[in-house]
Image: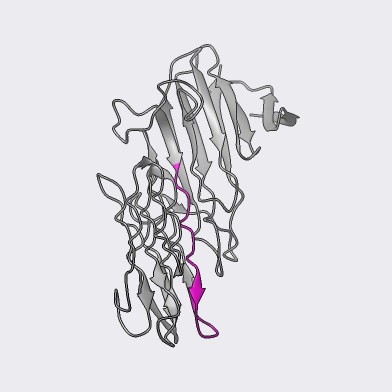
Amino acid sequence: MTGVLALVGGALVASPGTASAATLHTVRFTRQGSDAGFRVPAGVTLLDIVAIGARGAGAEAAGGSGAKVVGHNVPVAPGQSLNVYVAPQNTGGASYVGTCAIGHDPGCTPTAVTATDPRITVAGGGGGSGRALVSPGSWSRGGNAAAAPLDGVNGGVYMGGVYYPAQGGRHGALGGAGGIGFHHDAWGGCGSFPAGSNGTPGFGGPGGSLLFSLSGGRGGDGWVGGGGGGSSIAFCDDADFFGAGGGGGSSYSRAAAGPATAAVDGRGNALAPSVTIQYYTP
């Protein structure tokens, strides 16, 4: 099987080559922050889809990594119109392929229920890091968007060589749980600590925030969004204070080839968000 890559409208397209049997076509979408259309070719009923979600937003520390999810033999209909969205990096956005454009098409609403959700493959975004007033070498970061099998990871804080899970957003049927803030002397002490909001289908919960507080990170978007990290009141004593990192968003595919993985390279650097679609024609 052979083919030639060409840049067409922000997507890399592999033109058909000569082959004795089927010919593989590859369409790669890399333009971040915009929707693009993809029409299933005649005679095609299955797609392979690889989606990469965005890293979470960073305050003092980097946000959590996005997820990479692979859908193998995802069922589609010939001639079907699909929407492809690639999330902007450092936003915690989810990249997805669906039957409509969320936020643009009327009635296009994520439900996290297979029978009604318009998305057929979703790669969750990483949780955002919280703001911190800390000793050198301490930080609060967002949770990654990949854990076994497709859940997001809690956010947390790092201090004195120890990592403390900050309950930044566990994935669940109703969304990630809102996180709590942290300070050196106690969890939840030293005044009011507004919790982050729960994640919802499609969207991460906002981080907790209050006047004179260090806000928590936003949860990553996904099949179900991660919970927002809780905030921490600043200036009430001389302790370290952290807004908790948001939880990573969960991922999904109607025909997942395996668990989602962290969208990082061999050196731990975040991969650029993208969506790649492959299919065969006779």
- Residue 237 picture location, percent across and down: 41, 86
Main structural element of the magenta stretch: helix, strand or loop? loop
Residue 231 in sight from this viewpoint: yes
* x then y, percent, for residue 99: 45, 23
In the figure, 98 relative to 143: above or below? above
| Any part of residue 23 in sight | no
Residue furthest to the left: 173
On screen, residue 119 versus residue 172, left or right, reads: right
Position of residue 153 relative to residue 91, above or below, is below
* Colour treatment of the image: one colour
> Which of the two residues, 136 or 52, is positioned nearer the viewer here?
136
Q: 66 and 48: which one is in front? A: 66
Residue 4 placement: quadrant: top right
Q: Quadrant of the N terminus?
A: top right
Q: Residue furthest front?
A: 211
Q: Residue at x 43, y 77 (%)?
A: 241
Direction from residue 136 to residue 221 in the image, left or right: left
Give left or right: position of 15 versus 154: right
Residue 226 belongs to the span the image colors magenta: no
Q: Residue at x 47, y 55 (%)?
A: 126
The image shows residue 129 at horizontal and vertical percentages of 49, 64
Give the residue at x 44% y 65%: 211
Which residues, given as a range, are shown in magenta? Answer: 123-139
